[in-house]
């Protein structure tokens, strides 16, 4: 049976890697190389195949049009509706339904013909579509962590109630998911997320004051979209991942730790009650977690280069510097606070990163603005979706207002 896939955000870093993974999975199924065929056959996926039903972009019309030509999806969505006409002319000779705006994204996430919705949109913009997919009981492969941060309780509940599944694509969460298979949930004593530490890991608080946009965008290990690259530099990404892990694995925050691991080989670890620690290792390459989320529960040969132990001279772990990287400490506080706190935390970050990427504020102001916003916010417990969205909008407004003030 073929698996039918919608990729939300197919023109971004995760989206493009997902298409590479799917190309490789499909070509290995028809490979003439007999060893590859027998490898695939031995895992029972021969003859299945991965069919792209829908793709989306926000404004990258040319790239989306190229992808549509190559993969021939039945639907494409362009979420920035200003580009709808341009996309229509690009694809006028193709038999494809073109949708526009955030509603278009929701529509492709709910398509009857789609089995797997791979969410690779950046930021809170993916929330409506992932909730819509969860309501339809889809198999979710989630890279877009922000919706889980904002509405983790609601989203995981919706997945359960509608008989869907949720598989992590984030490399750390994929590692935890894989390590968790070594025991039962009750046997887990803690989960340990690893972090590369980003480009400013070794800097003092004073040095961080003057880092530039260019320096913040130069991640030492991972090649990612601009927002997550800045989040890695502030360590906000790890803070978001703590909250993501809290919901994905239904773990109290007290059972979650973060350790800096600059080599980015151990993608995360799970400690069990008997003291055993199970880790997942691999090269820093998103193709592996993407593929695992697509082929789970099976494992098949893929394009991710294999780890060579003789190439690794050492694996190091150190405690994060919570003074220099205040965002991480805030992430733990927000995860403990629950309610609307994470929606404010995430939205303030998105707004501040947007201003930083536009060259309007210094790097260090990102976390200052987030903290100021959190301090002003009265957390609401057990929020409904509307209240989460209001908290999100309020936080964005606060950040933009603070910046425009002299
Ligand atoms: N990159 C990684 O290695 C990595 C690893 C783990 C997790 N993640 C997570 O995966 C998600 C995607 O990251 P990325 O690095 O792939 O980001 P990216 O390269 O910036 O790509 C983002 C994708 O989302 C689309 N998009 C942008 N704004 C949108 C909006 N308002 N509404 C709908 N779609 C929008 C973009 O379309 P256009 O091309 O038209 O702008 C693009 O297709 C993030 O949540 C990130 O935290 C990424």
Image: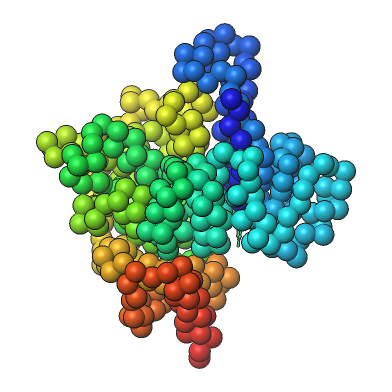
Q: Which quadrant of the picture is home to ligand 1? A: bottom right
- Viewer-nearest residue: 269 or 48: 48
**Residue in the image at 65% along x and 60% along y:** 103
- Viewer-nearest residue: 393 or 241: 393
Relative to 257, does residue 296 appear above or below in the rendering? above
**Residue in the image at 49% along x and 67% along y:** 350
**Residue in the image at 76% along x and 61% along y:** 83
Please identify the quarter of the rendering in which residue 172 is found.
top left
Q: Position of residue 24 (x, y in %)?
A: 59, 27
Marker count (numbered): 0
> Residue farthest to the left?
274
**Residue in the image at 58% along x and 70% along y:** 358
Q: Position of residue 296 (x, y in %)?
A: 44, 31
Q: Position of residue 53 (x, y in %)?
A: 67, 40
Relative to 29, does residue 320 appear above or below in the rendering? below
Q: Position of residue 381 (x, y in %)?
A: 32, 72
Whether residue 349 is visible: no
Please identify the quarter of the rendering in which residue 331 is found.
bottom left
Whether residue 135 is visible: yes
Q: How has the structure been colored for display?
A: rainbow
Quarter of the figure with the N terminus = top right
């Amino acid at each position: 049976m073929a698996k039918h896939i919608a990729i939300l955000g197919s023109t971004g870093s995760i989206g493009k890697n997902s298409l590479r993974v799917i190309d490789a999975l499909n070509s290995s199924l028809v490979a003439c190389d007999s060893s590859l065929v027998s490898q695939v056959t031995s895992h029972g996926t021969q003859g299945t195949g991965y069919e792209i039903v829908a793709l989306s972009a926000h404004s990258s019309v040319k790239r989306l049009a190229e992808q549509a030509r190559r993969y021939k999806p039945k639907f494409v969505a362009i979420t920035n509706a200003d580009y709808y006409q341009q996309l229509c002319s690009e694809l006028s000779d193709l038999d494809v339904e073109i949708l526009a705006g955030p509603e278009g994204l929701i529509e492709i996430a709910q398509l009857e013909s789609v089995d797997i919705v791979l969410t690779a949109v950046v930021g809170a913009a993916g929330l409506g579509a992932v909730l819509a997919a969860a309501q339809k009981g889809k198999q979710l492969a989630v890279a877009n962590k922000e919706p889980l941060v904002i509405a983790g309780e609601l989203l995981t509940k919706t997945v359960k109630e509608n008989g869907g599944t949720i598989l992590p694509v984030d490399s750390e969460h994929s590692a935890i998911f894989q390590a968790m298979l070594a025991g039962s949930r009750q046997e887990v004593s803690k989960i340990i997320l690893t972090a590369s530490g980003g480009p400013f890991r070794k800097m003092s608080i004073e040095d961080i004051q003057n880092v530039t946009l260019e320096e913040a965008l130069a991640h030492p290990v991972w090649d990612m979209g601009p927002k997550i690259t800045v989040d890695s530099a502030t360590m906000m990404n790890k803070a978001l991942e703590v909250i993501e892990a809290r919901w994905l694995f239904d773990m109290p925050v007290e059972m979650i730790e973060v350790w800096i691991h600059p080599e980015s080989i151990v993608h995360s670890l799970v400690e069990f009650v008997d003291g055993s620690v199970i880790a997942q290792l691999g090269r820093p390459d998103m193709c592996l977690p993407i593929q695992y989320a697509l082929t789970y529960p099976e494992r098949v040969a893929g394009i991710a280069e294999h780890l060579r132990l003789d190439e690794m001279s050492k694996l190091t772990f150190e405690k994060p510097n919570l003074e220099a990287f205040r965002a991480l400490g805030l992430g733990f506080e927000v995860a403990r606070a629950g309610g609307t706190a994470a929606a404010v935390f995430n939205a303030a970050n998105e707004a501040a990163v947007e201003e930083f990427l536009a060259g309007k504020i210094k790097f260090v102001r990102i976390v200052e603005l987030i903290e100021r916003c959190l301090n002003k916010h009265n957390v609401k417990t057990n929020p409904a979706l509307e209240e989460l969205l209001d908290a999100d909008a309020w936080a964005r407004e606060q950040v933009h207002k603070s910046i425009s003030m002299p």
